[in-house]
Image (spheres, helix red, strand yellow):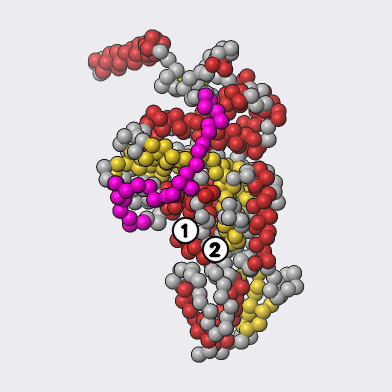
Amino acid sequence: MSPSSRYALRALNVLARGRLRALEPVGGFAHETGLTTGLLSSTKSAFSGARGISSISKPCQCGKVLCNGHRVNTVSDHGVNVQSVRQHATGSTAPSLKDRHKEILKSFPRALGVDDFITRVEIALAGYGFTGDNTIAMSNLCRDESCMVLEDKIETVFGSCFSTHGLGGVLTCGVIGIKAGLSHSPVVGGKERYVFFSFPHIGIDSNGKVGGISRPNRPGASSACGALIACLGDLKKDGLDKSLKSPGVHDPLEPEYSILKQRLARRAAFEGLQPADMSLVDITALAERTITTDLEYLIEKAVDPAKANYAVVTGVQIHNWAADLDNPDVPSLEFVSVGKCYVVVNGKKVHLDLRAVPALSPRQLKLLSQAAPADPPGVATTANSASSGMLQELPRDYLLRRLGGVQSHSNVDEGAAPNWSEYVQTTYEESHPNAPRMDGTHPFEAKQAPKAEPKAANTSFFGFGKKEAAEAHVPAMQVWRSMRSAHAAAVAMPN
């Protein structure tokens, strides 16, 4: 058997086992880190020749035989379709991925590719003792099905999440909801460990349209985040005053949306922002800051740092998908703009700079992505600068299926110091340390009377004093007693 045939058989064996690895050069083939679709094209053609099947390459629709970004159809002289592989991973298409990343960076300067982001998170947190074996992930995303891409990445590392999702990422689960998830945590070495992930989201499609996203089998353009777009429209139209209501007051038919809008309005008023001057990017960033403050307040109420270690990772999820998912020739990308990242271990808080964590190589990134659901070989991958890290395409087949955890067996040495050097640690200055909290007013609101609607429901645990709560309880008790008396009288009546 010729060297090229041996190389082809080896490549196909690797693919059959569902693995990706760097293949050493055989018989004069040029070595390339990772597998590209161009390499697969060569190996499959060689394999076909070894079996006595001659094959020819048919030009794609643009007229080229090898066309980057399109498909290469190779057919045998028997008319059998040998392969149809999209040529995305070759070098000449890499700049287009970089250009799309540059477009994202204009709005979100701290954005990383989602695979690069979750890898850095895993590496950084492992240095402080958080792994998939000993930690539960608490994920707070928008309810939009497009957000499950990020949740899949999180679950690949930490296993199934306890979710507290809400429209726009708003937190409505309360302290009891948070505690419910914490009670499911593994206990290793006498301690529980949690990682809190929180991300509102935004679409910026492959054409650079802010708010744009394509959805499978749905004609026309869609948008993300729909809840934040609606909030921005309402606040522009009505101003902030209409939504500045007492905490706990909401529209009973639109509980999550009205709470989201109230919290954004209160935060915008506190920061001195005017809705008329805000863009979708601005309100998404505002949502990230608001929801992060809410999350940290709930953590303060729910977590005992003497009994548990925890980490907080926040930011904005960005869908940079193909403007038309029906077009298989345009890659879809996913980014995460990094917000806060810190650990609290034995009561000590340490902020981490994920951009200081070294990025993986293309081969390593492919190997890890292969562990995720249905990431086929040949997806587009490219290296950016050291700070921007790696970019990797979201497989279209995965997107269409997903929209339609790797556990490490490691032991945590309780007495060991964190593995990470100080260069990963960073300082963090809170830009709004006195931001309004979800259960009370704030000095900046003192000039304004609470704008509670008469018929609006109040579900806050802290919205009533003891006297008010007792008074509200009396009518309900009277109704219940009268109903009980009527029932007893009916039972006592003779037939």
Quarter of the image where one finds residue 302:
top left
SS for tag 2?
helix
Eye-nearest disc, 1 or 2: 2
Q: Is residue 376 visible?
A: no
Q: Nearer the viewer, residue 300 or 222?
A: 300
Tell me if residue 383 comes above or below residue 196 in the rendering.
below
Q: Nearer the viewer, residue 118 or 427?
A: 427
Q: Is residue 186 visible?
A: yes
For the stretch drawn in magenta, the main secondary structure is loop
Quarter of the image where one finds residue 27:
bottom right
Give how far across and how far down residue 212 sits, in percent. Answer: 66, 45
Question: In the image, what residue occupies the spot 37% across and 55% down?
Answer: 407
Question: In the image, what residue occupies the spot 57% across and 57% down?
Answer: 390
**Mark 1 crowdedness (10 Å alpha carbons): few <14, some 14-19, many ≥20:** some
Q: Is residue 271 left or right of residue 368?
A: right
Q: Is residue 336 magenta?
A: no
Q: Which residue is mark 1?
A: 372
Question: In the image, what residue occupies the spot 50% across and 52% down?
Answer: 357
Tell me if residue 455 comes above or below residue 126 in the rendering.
above
Give how far across and how far down residue 176 sits, in percent. Answer: 37, 31
Q: Is residue 489 left or right of residue 461?
A: left
Question: In the image, what residue occupies the spot 55% across and 44% down?
Answer: 338
Give how far across and how far down residue 490 sits, in percent. Answer: 29, 16
Residue lying at the far right of the rendered structure: 63
Gap between marks 1 and 2, in whole Å?
16 Å
| Residue 362 numbered tag | 2
Q: Quadrant of the C terminus?
A: top left
**Mark 2 crowdedness (10 Å alpha carbons): few <14, some 14-19, many ≥20:** some
Q: Amino acid at mark 2?
A: Pro
**Mark 1 vs mark 2: which is more N-terminal?**
2
Magenta part of the chain: 408-435
